[in-house]
Image (tube, grey):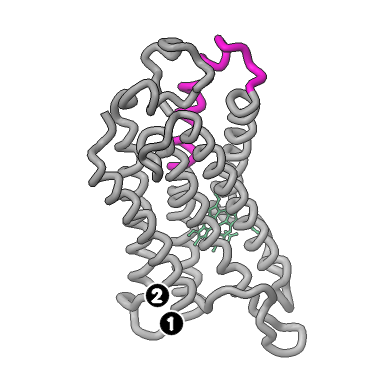
């Protein structure tokens, strides 16, 4: 059985808090966002306003869109949605997540490349490798989901066999995304600490906000996954494969 409605509301409040705290951090303390680097003198600039889109897009991608996509069968925003509507919601949210991941990657690469006098190298950090791996997995999962379920190309037997793998990988990509965000937040915090040297000491909002953000991300992951602890509520609400016959999923009635 899915958790009570109150727990789902709590989950959504935490997701929204991630976005709000992230925005306070970015707009209040990291300099906000922009479309071109800030001019700092001849052949010198600061592209951090372009970079700052990166955490915002990633916050929209993983703890908002992908988290809601993972909830779409068990606890959709539109609680009265029937199975086909839940499937449409799931596809729409995963599409939005993928778009935000691409935008998030483009903005960080652009900010590195536009830096003057010397561009910042791309893909040098453990976070960037983790991010590339997670993004690649998200793309593979999305493409396979389309191939197998949205415009089914697989036989019914193969689709039924794919459901538990799709459900497992979907939740895995969400968890990896949240984990990658925490490494990115830690990396940015260390850069702020060493390069920006902000006023106010180590308990200033420059450091407390990212710490709060990381806690919220952990709670988001736990709260979303908790919705998947038991079998789906009913075949009509919990089974994401509307094309399958009654009972075809056996014990794997997952979303
Ligand atoms: C709040 C969330 C995030 C923050 C604060 C953040 C922070 C950063 C920082 C500071 C960099 C530049 C340094 C570096 O190259 O490592 C970076 C780059 C990168 N991030 Fe993130 N990140 C976040 C989320 C994510 C997520 C969720 C992914 C992918 C799933 C991701 C993927 C990448 C990649 C691939 C790069 C390398 C880009 C390049 O080298 O040009 N990041 N991130």
Residue 134: in magenta span? no
Residue that numbered label 2 is attached to = 206
Secondary element at tag 1: loop
- Neighbour class for label 2 at 10 Å: few (<14), some, many (≥20)? many
Q: CA distance from mark 2 to mark 1?
A: 7 Å
Query: What residue is rendered at 50% in x and 22% in y?
Result: 242
- Report x, y in % for residue 118: 73, 73
Query: What residue is rendered at 39% in x and 45% in y?
Result: 77
Q: Nearer the viewer, residue 197 or 169?
A: 169
Quarter assignment of residue 42: bottom right
Q: Magenta residues?
A: 152-175
Seen in the image, is 55 located left or right of residue 136? left
Image disc number at residue 198: 1
Is the C-beta separation of discs 2 and 1 under 8 Å? yes
Q: Main secondary structure of the magenta part?
A: helix
Secondary element at tag 2: helix
- Report x, y in % for residue 143: 64, 33
Establish if 198 lies above or below 207: below
Quarter assignment of residue 233: top left
- Report x, y in % for residue 114: 72, 71
Query: What residue is rendered at 26% in x and 42% in y?
Result: 5
Could you tell which of marks 2 and 1 lies nearer the N-terminus?
1
Establish if 149 lies above or below 203: above
Residue 165: in magenta span? yes
- Badge 1 residue CB within 8 Å of ligand 1: no
Query: What residue is rendered at 26% in x and 28% in y?
Result: 1
Establish if 123 lies above or below 191: above
Which corner quadrant of the figure contains ligand 1? Answer: bottom right
Q: Farthest residue in the right direction? A: 43
Seen in the image, is 39 located left or right of residue 228? right
């Amino acid at each position: 059985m899915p958790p009570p409605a109150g727990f789902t509301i709590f989950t959504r409040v935490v997701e929204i808090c991630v976005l709000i705290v992230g925005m306070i951090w970015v707009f209040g303390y990291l300099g906000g966002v922009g479309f071109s680097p800030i001019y700092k003198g001849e052949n010198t600039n600061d592209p951090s306003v372009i970079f700052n889109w990166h955490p915002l897009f990633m916050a929209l991608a993983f703890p908002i869109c992908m988290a809601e996509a993972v909830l779409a069968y068990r606890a959709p925003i539109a609680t009265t949605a029937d199975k086909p509507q839940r499937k449409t919601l799931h596809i729409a949210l995963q599409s939005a997540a993928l778009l935000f991941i691409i935008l998030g990657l483009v903005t960080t690469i652009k900010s590195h490349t536009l830096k003057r006098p010397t561009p910042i190298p791309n893909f040098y950090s453990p976070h960037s490798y983790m991010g590339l791996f997670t993004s690649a997995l998200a793309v593979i999962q999305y493409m396979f989901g389309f191939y197998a379920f949205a415009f089914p190309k697989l036989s019914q037997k193969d689709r039924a066999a794919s459901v538990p793998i799709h459900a497992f990988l979907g939740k895995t990509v969400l968890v990896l995304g949240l984990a990658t965000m925490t490494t990115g937040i830690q990396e940015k915090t260390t850069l702020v600490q060493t390069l920006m040297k902000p006023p106010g000491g180590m308990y200033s909002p420059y450091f407390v906000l990212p710490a709060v953000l990381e806690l919220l991300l952990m709670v988001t992951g736990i709260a979303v996954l908790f919705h998947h602890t038991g079998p789906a509520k009913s075949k009509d609400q919990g089974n994401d494969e509307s094309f399958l016959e009654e009972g075809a999923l056996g014990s794997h009635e997952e979303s």
